Image (tube, rainbow, N blue to C red):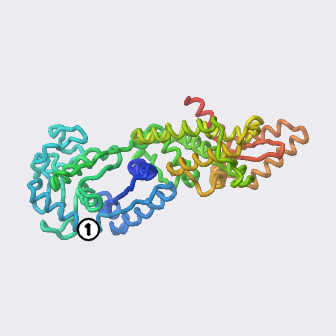
Amino acid sequence: MTSAISAMLGSMLPSIYLRHLGYQVTYVRNFTDVDDKIISRAKELGEDPISLSRRYCEEFNRDMVYLHCLPPSAEPRVSDHMPQILDMIKQIIENGYAYIVDGDVYFSVEKFPDYGRLSGRKLEDNRAGERVAVDSRKKHPADFALWKTAKEGEPFWDSPWGPGRPGWHIECSAMSAAYLGYSFDIHGGGMDLVFPHHENEIAQSCAVCNHSNISYWIHNGFVTVDSEKMSKSLGNFFTIRQVIDLYHPLALRLFLLGTHYQSPINYADVLLESASDRIFYIYQTLHDCESALSQRDVVTLKDTIPPDTVNIINNFYNVFVTSMSDDLHTPVVLAALSDPLKTINDLLHTRKGKKQELRIESLAAFGKILGNVLSTLGLMPESYSEQLRDKALKRAKLTEDQVLQKIDERTAARKNKEYERSDIIRKDLAAVGIALMDSPDGTTWRPAVPLAIQEQQVSIT
């Protein structure tokens, strides 16, 4: 879950928005398929570390597709870039920034005066054991490994310093340099990577090329669950696959975009239910708009739209561009959807709206701008509402036939003036997130926030 948020908010959003603005974007997303945690997990499972990593990478990529995340221009893996890593370590040693101890290679932080410029930490603040390994062989406690001597049972590669494997930090520097050079525009990741990982990346890259520079570092906040940090040790850890088993993937995406990427994201059922309800409203509105437009010959539409429509569209687009250009303030953009969506529904369903001059032209203009913005946010689905309805039925533990049977029972009860029975059926369905809607044409249903969660929303606000 956390890795997906990092990928989506830390680098994918800038990529898709910059492309919307007309920039050519090279988006690189690397996989660390060789590190201590992977090796430890592989030992537990009795599996080859590289094979395990490959499986995890494939699952991650499937999650990214579900969440409508753009595929990267390149997706390098450590195990495929050992020559580049070895070359970078050699250059760092030759430039006097690293030293060799018993087959291990360490970066000497005291050789790099700017160490700490990203995190604001000073060398004297870095005490052994606090996010840096304790090792009496190191010249300074903050020195970090560029190359680690091979241990029994671990994967290794040959090197000038003996068999071993790279340290975590050098892997990322070598791969980014291979695909983007030593200076590029944006580097993303989780807030926990500011120190020591990204700090060490800067030091390594500058040790090889003194003109190395990243124009913008962007770091996303942590994920919490009901206001507690998500972690396996707390037992509140879950995967994206588990979430989208019950919720539409784009409901999850909308939920994530509802918080600025730098802020902590608090996952709670009440918040995801709200996001699911909101995205159903968005898609139902667009579906109704397209249905109305499909009944008219597009060729006969006039080129002009009413001034009120022009003002709403211009205001909405200005908010979109201004907010996204101001450090990707997606929550502001999502809030700004309200005006155009409400206006569409007024044009479709109210007596006054149906009589408005150039009504169809307005609907076409609103549909176009909303489609463009939602596409840029990665929120345009292949179909509008069927999967949302299917997920709602699954959460309610009901089938479509069972809901329709309840609707028939309620219709019969109303016909027989059994109003108490009718109300009980409605409330029972509402309790599990199925809302009934009556109209002259009959009763239909739509997904809704379950009653118990609605009460939680009220208590929160």
Q: Residue furthest right?
A: 416
Percent position of residue 404, x then y: 78, 51
Percent position of residue 39, x then y: 30, 62
Percent position of residue 206, x then y: 18, 51
Badge 1: few (under 14), some or many (20 or more) residues near its Cα, within 10 Å? some
Q: Quadrant of residue 245?
A: bottom right
Classify 353 as above or below 11: above
Classify 227 as above or below 197: above
Left or right of residue 99: residue 204: right
Left or right of residue 134: residue 197: right
Classify 354 as above or below 189: above
Quadrant location of the C terminus? top right
Percent position of residue 99, x then y: 9, 56
Q: Quadrant of residue 414?
A: top right
Residue flagged by tag 1: what amino acid is it? Pro
Residue carrying label 1 = 155
Q: In which quarter of the image is residue 177?
A: bottom left
Residue drawn at the location 14% of the way across and 60% of the way down: 91
Residue drawn at the location 69% of the way across and 55% of the way down: 299
Does residue 229 appear anywhere in the picture?
Answer: no
Residue drawn at the location 53% of the way across and 45% of the way down: 254
Left or right of residue 288: residue 181: left
Q: Nearer the viewer, residue 449 or 255?
A: 255
Secondary structure state at the residue bearing disc 1: loop
Q: Nearer the viewer, residue 138 or 182?
A: 182
